[in-house]
Image (spheres, rainbow, N blue to C red):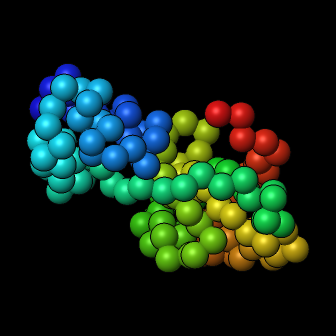
Amino acid sequence: MLDLIDEKLLNMLEKNAKLTNKEIASKVGLTEGAVRRRIRILEQSHIIIGYKARIKYNLIDKTYMIVGLDIAPEHFNSVILKLKDMPEIKELYTTTGDHVAVFIASISSGKVNSFIEEIEKIEGMRHVYPAFVQEIVK
């Protein structure tokens, strides 16, 4: 169970993963060592699953897309495993609602159509719903 300090820590790291332990410690009233231990525990318990840079892909001639998927139930696990291994896919989620899975990908602008076609050809894929990010607002 998380306490209030863990929640503050997570909120700060989510907003800026480059904060140092010293900066975090001064904001939550702990020592740097205590912050380091808490972060290590959050990582080991898989509450923190990674750190990443956010990139404006359009500035480096790449297309950034969010793609919803409709997958046949009997092929769901095999499709997810195939998608998980594709380097263009940066994040992959299983979901409820309009899509059973959603992924975020970045692709060289000239290869978008062939990438979508490759996804559509995976056995069990019923439909692919790409949305192309025009601007990252937040």
From the viewer's perspective, tell me whether residue 46 is left or right of residue 84: left
Residue drawn at (50%, 77%) of the image = 85
Q: Residue furthest right?
A: 110
| Image position of 121 with respect to 34: above or below | below
From the viewer's perspective, tell me whether residue 68 is left or right of residue 80: right
Residue nearest the observer in this picture, 62 or 101: 62
| Image position of 29 with respect to 111: above or below | above
Is residue 11 visible in the rendered structure shown here? Answer: yes
The percent coordinates of residue 41 (x first, y second) are: 14, 49
Residue drawn at (34%, 47%) of the image = 20
Residue drawn at (56%, 63%) of the image = 90
The percent coordinates of residue 126 (x first, y second) are: 66, 60
The image quarter containing residue 134 is top right
Residue nearest the observer in this picture, 65 or 114: 65
The image quarter containing residue 60 is bottom right
Residue nearest the observer in this picture, 56 or 73: 56
